[in-house]
Image: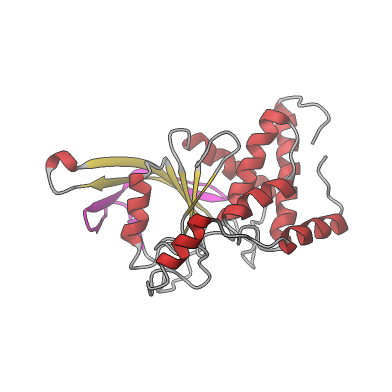
Amino acid sequence: MIETNKDDLITQFKKITDTPHVHTDDEIVAIERNKSEKGRNRSGADIPDYVNAVFVHAFQANRKYILAQSPMPNTVQDFLTLAYQENCSCIVSFEQSDGTKDMGEYNPADNQVLKKGQLSVTCGRDKVANEYSIQKGLTIEFTGSTQNEGGKSTLRHFEFTDWNRTGNVPCSPAKYVAFLKDVKMASSNGPVLVHCRDGGSKSGMFCVMAFLVEKMVVEHEVSVVNAVRKVKARRPNAVPNQAQFDFCHDCVLEFVRSFKTYSNIGGNT
């Protein structure tokens, strides 16, 4: 049963935030290894590794999502290399264009070629814009030092645009659920690289909701609290505020309503 009482939601979220995050051995090693690196991560990066990236499991697939910080100008090549080497099926962007100079461009304009080291990126002609997102195809080509070492990866790029004025949560649970479904349809063949400015505050909520939607389809019941805990164990700054926690509940209810339109899933929500 999905709890929607405001006081109960506040209590649930407080219990989550009151639980301290304990770094794993791998996290401790990564933090120590990168202490000497300057200017490669934004402040607050919990696992500094040039793109602040961690794997997060989906409900039915391990290491399905890669949560990363949006690339800086000097980490675009690292970001693209990650997408290429992990054979990502798509990239999901929660970055709001604000004209700041600390954002690295990896997504070229139509008919343009972006070159970073041995990687070249081009944008496909197919482009879909709707009321909550912009979608297009990207091709990442690795030239290599010889012809035999080259390769090419084609993936979908999703940019979610339907944020409220503060930018903490999307405007509409219905549109966010529709966005989740769009990404799922495009990501059956590989991991999903999800990014936002700090690598967690918006990307983490996406992973929480993707996990919940998959679980609801299979088991017809979910726990938002447990899903948030799972993702925060990998990315502590995921779902950082009460507004996002409440929004996750709203999305679950929206998904149930939309799901029942096409299929009777019983009385459990």
Q: State the quadrant of the C terminus.
A: top right
Q: Is residue 21 left or right of residue 70?
A: right
Residue 6 spot, x, y in % from top left:
85, 57
Residue 131 within the magenta-colored segment of the rendering: yes
The quarter of the picture where residue 153 lies is top left
Instruction: Please indicate, yes or no, whether residue 171 appears anywhere in the rendered image.
Output: yes
**Residue at 38%, 44% in the rendered image:** 86
Q: State the quadrant of the N terminus.
A: top right
Instruction: Please indicate, yes or no, whether residue 138 appears anywhere in the rendered image.
Output: no
Front-most of 137 and 42?
A: 42
Region rendered in magenta: 105-134
Residue 63 spot, x, y in % from top left:
50, 42
**Residue at 83%, 30% in the rendered image:** 267
**Residue at 43%, 37% in the rendered image:** 190
The correct choice, above or below, for 147 with respect to 52 in the image is above
The quarter of the picture where residue 77 lies is bottom left
Front-most of 181 and 216?
A: 216
The correct choice, above or below, for 17 with respect to 80 in the image is below
Residue 251 spot, x, y in % from top left:
70, 46
The correct choice, above or below, for 131 with respect to 147 in the image is below
